[in-house]
Image: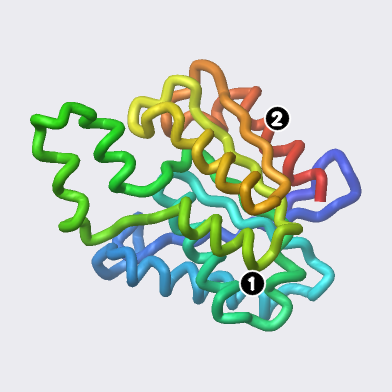
């Protein structure tokens, strides 16, 4: 989808439907979704002009897929990836699934926090951001949290922001008051944060 906005820039949105989600066939798994993300990013890099600024945007689990996918891409040293991926937009992200378990079930007498070794998926955004920072500190990151997020516990975005700062990345974190987990883009404040970020490239 192409969109001409108030400025003279052209924006193209490439949406990825992971395997097992929406109308895509297959069973969702972290390994499979990572392959989907890699294929999509390679397609974008190969299809669009080298002068195009690329911003990778993920929401919720998609934020984990975006950060892990970008780390994988940089580690595989795709030609020009380091220079062309200009931004990373993480909407309602979490640190990783283990941290989510502990945050949701802090009581030590409950068994859930001890199930982390058995997780089939981890979506470790923290480690991914550390790898990304080592590969390319010029990347700009926006973390957008939902002020009333009923799924991701508070504090997750702040941890990821700290990781970015430790790696020397240009990072900004914003919270959208009154927004539930999937409502960031339905609130004017959320849209303004994202539009400002995308328009800055």
Q: Is residue 16 above or below residue 4?
A: below
Q: Is residue 112 left or right of residue 72?
A: left
- Number of the label disc, if any, that sits on residue 129: none
> Can you identify the residue that label 1 sits on?
44
> Can you identify the residue that label 2 sits on?
192
Q: Is residue 182 left or right of residue 52?
A: left
- Tell me the distance, in whole angstroms, between the alpha carbons under discs 2 and 1: 26 Å
Q: In this view, does 99 lie above or below 167?
A: above
Q: Nearer the viewer, residue 195 or 60?
A: 60
Crowdedness near tag 2: few (<14), some (14–19) or many (≥20) residues, C-alpha within 10 Å: few
Q: In this view, does 154 lie to the left or right of 80?
A: left
Secondary structure, mark 2, is: helix
Q: In this view, does 199 lie above or below 16?
A: above
The image position of residue 185, as x and y in percent, is: 56, 33
Q: Nearer the viewer, residue 168 or 29?
A: 168
Crowdedness near tag 1: few (<14), some (14–19) or many (≥20) residues, C-alpha within 10 Å: some
Secondary structure, mark 1, is: helix
The image position of residue 110, as x and y in percent, is: 10, 32
- Ranked by sequence position, the earlier of labels 2 and 1 is 1
């Amino acid at each position: 989808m192409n969109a001409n906005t108030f400025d003279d820039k052209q924006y193209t949105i490439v949406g990825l439907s992971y395997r097992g989600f929406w109308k895509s066939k297959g069973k969702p798994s972290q390994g499979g979704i990572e392959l989907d993300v890699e294929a999509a990013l390679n397609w974008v890099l190969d299809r669009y002009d080298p002068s195009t600024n690329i911003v990778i945007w993920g929401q919720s689990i998609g934020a984990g897929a975006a950060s892990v996918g970008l780390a994988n891409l940089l580690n595989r040293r795709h030609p020009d990836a380091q220079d062309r991926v200009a931004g990373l937009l993480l909407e309602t992200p979490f640190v990783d699934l283990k941290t989510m378990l502990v945050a949701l079930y802090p009581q030590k007498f409950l068994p859930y926090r001890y199930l982390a070794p058995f997780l089939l998926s981890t979506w470790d955004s923290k480690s991914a951001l550390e790898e990304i920072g080592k590969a390319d500190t010029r990347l700009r990151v926006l973390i957008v949290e939902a002020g009333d997020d009923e799924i991701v516990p508070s504090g997750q975005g702040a941890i990821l922001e700290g990781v970015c700062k430790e790696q020397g990345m240009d990072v900004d974190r914003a919270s959208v008051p009154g927004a539930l987990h999937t409502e960031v883009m339905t609130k004017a404040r959320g849209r303004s944060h994202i539009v400002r970020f995308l328009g800055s490239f």
